[in-house]
Image (tube, grey):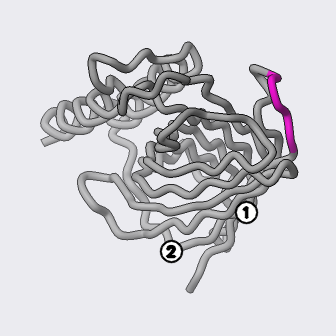
Amino acid sequence: MAMLRFVTTYGAIALLTAGSGSARADAEVQGIAIASGVVVVASILANAPQREEPDSIAFEAGRFDPIKNDKQATAFGVEYHLDKFVWWGLRPFVGAGFTSDRSAWGYGGIRYATEWGEHIGITPSFAIGGYSKGNGKDLGHPPVLGRFGLDLEYRFNNDARIGAAYYHMSNGKVLHQTNNPGTEVIGLTFSIPIR
């Protein structure tokens, strides 16, 4: 059973990160894909149990475009994490964000929460969403993006969490966009359980 779970979960993540033949993965996406794969494989090989979590709301504040540094801005976001398992440890989530340059985005996808001891969690995620540039960075047209991320969190005994998030958003030219600059968001997160 563990081997089937390993093959199926890792295969799904590989398919999600591979994209289509026309996609050109940025180094950031490749780094997140490798890190996500390592986290998932290590979690499965360690036979780490998936703990039940209540639904939660996560708030984030950080920097938009800090790596490419083309159009930096302050970023804010909110996510709703559902406890419900969709498929072997994958859980749905939805979120939205905006910047001080009036860029905005919304997305929905899946997360794979892994636990490392009593209080540390690492969660890779993948989502698909839309983007409006406002006065900020142009991420291509049509503005449909993939969002690849990793969260590192400390869980308190009451299930509240504090942590750091890193995610990359880009179109990968999957819909034949001519422009694919991509961007990252790095931020601090605070998650509150909903009972």
Spatial CA distance of label 1 from label 2 is 16 Å
The picture places residue 15, in percent across and down from the top left corner, at 26, 30
- Looking at the image, can residue 124 be seen? no
Of the residues shown, which amino acid type is indicated by label 2? Pro
Which residue is the site of mark 2?
Answer: 54
| 122 lies left or right of 160 | left
Q: Judging from the image, what secondary structure is the residue with disc 1 in?
A: strand
Of the residues shown, which amino acid type is indicated by label 1? Phe
Total numbered labels placed on residues in the image = 2
The picture places residue 59, in percent across and down from the top left corner, at 73, 63
Near mark 1 (Cα within 10 A), the count class, few <14, some 14-19 or many ≥20, is: some
The picture places residue 95, in percent across and down from the top left corner, at 57, 61
Please, is residue 112 above or below residue 46 in the view?
below
Q: Which mark is residue 59?
A: 1
The picture places residue 93, in percent across and down from the top left corner, at 47, 61
Residue under the point 45% across and 28% down: 177
Please, is residue 113 above or below residue 12 in the view?
below
Q: Quadrant of the N terminus?
A: top left
| Residue situated in front as seen by the camera: 143 or 56 | 143
Q: Which numbered disc, 1 or 2, marks the residue that appears first in the sequence?
A: 2
| Residue situated in front as seen by the camera: 181 or 119 | 181
Q: Which residues are magenta?
A: 69-73
Residue 17: quadrant of the picture: top left
**Residue 174, magenta (yes or no):** no
- Looking at the image, can residue 148 be seen? yes
Q: Quadrant of the C terminus?
A: bottom right
Residue under the point 73% across and 43% down: 164
Please, is residue 140 above or below residue 93 in the view?
above
**Secondary structure that dominates the magenta span:** loop
Residue under the point 68% across and 32% down: 184
Q: Judging from the image, what secondary structure is the residue with disc 2 in?
A: loop
Residue depth check, mark 1 versus mark 2: number of the one nearer the observer: 1
